Amino acid sequence: MRGYRKRGPIVHSRAKVEQFPTMMSLRRLCKHLEVSRATVTGWIRDKELPAVPAGEGWLILRHELIEWMEKTKRLSK
């Protein structure tokens, strides 16, 4: 689990997250949240972040991301 971020939450504003695309690839989500691929993969693997398998990668839906961020206190007003 090297590189996997377990420490404090990464907080983003709701307005910023609502501008994200409706559906994002793992790479695009990493870019938007400014975290490593290992961090997001760890969240998905541990079933913390909802994601849909797509080919050899993952898709993350914006509304599920917002719900997850609210639940884990990663979203500010």
Image (cartoon, rainbow, N blue to C red):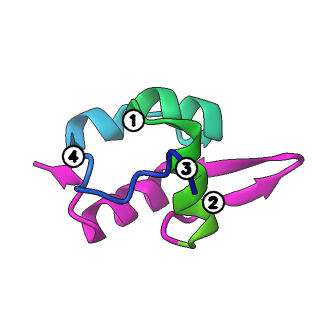
Q: Which mark is in front, 4 or 2? A: 4
- In the current view of this chain or complex, which residue is farthest to the front? 2
Q: Residues within 10 Å of mark 2 (few under 14, many from 20)?
A: many
- Distance in Å between CA atoms under marks 3 and 2: 21 Å
Inter-mark Cα distance, 3 to 4: 22 Å
Mark 1 crowdedness (10 Å alpha carbons): few <14, some 14-19, many ≥20: some
Which numbered disc flags the more N-terminal residue, 1 or 2?
A: 1
Looking at the image, residue 57 sits to the left or right of residue 71; the answer is right
Instruction: Determine whether the residue tagged by mark 4 lies in a helix, strand or loop.
Output: loop
Q: Quadrant of the N terminus?
A: bottom right
**Visible residue check, residue 61:** no
Mark 3 surroundings within 10 Å by alpha-carbon count, few (fewer than 14), some (14 through 19), many (20 or more):
few
Is residue 45 in the magenta section? no
The span from disc 1 to disc 3 (Cα, nearest Å) is 19 Å
Q: Say what amino acid the circle numbered 4 marks.
A: Val
Distance from disc 4 to disc 2, alpha carbons, whole Å, reads: 19 Å
Considering only order in the chain, which callout, 3 or 1, is on the residue closer to the N terminus? 3
Which residue is disc 1 drawn over?
Answer: 33
- Residue 23 seen by the camera: yes
Magenta span of residues: 48-77
Front of the two marks 1 and 3? 3
Residue type for callout 1: Leu
Q: Horizontal placement of 66 versus 40: left or right?
A: left
**Mark 2, residue position:** 51
Question: According to the image, label 3 marks what residue?
Answer: 2
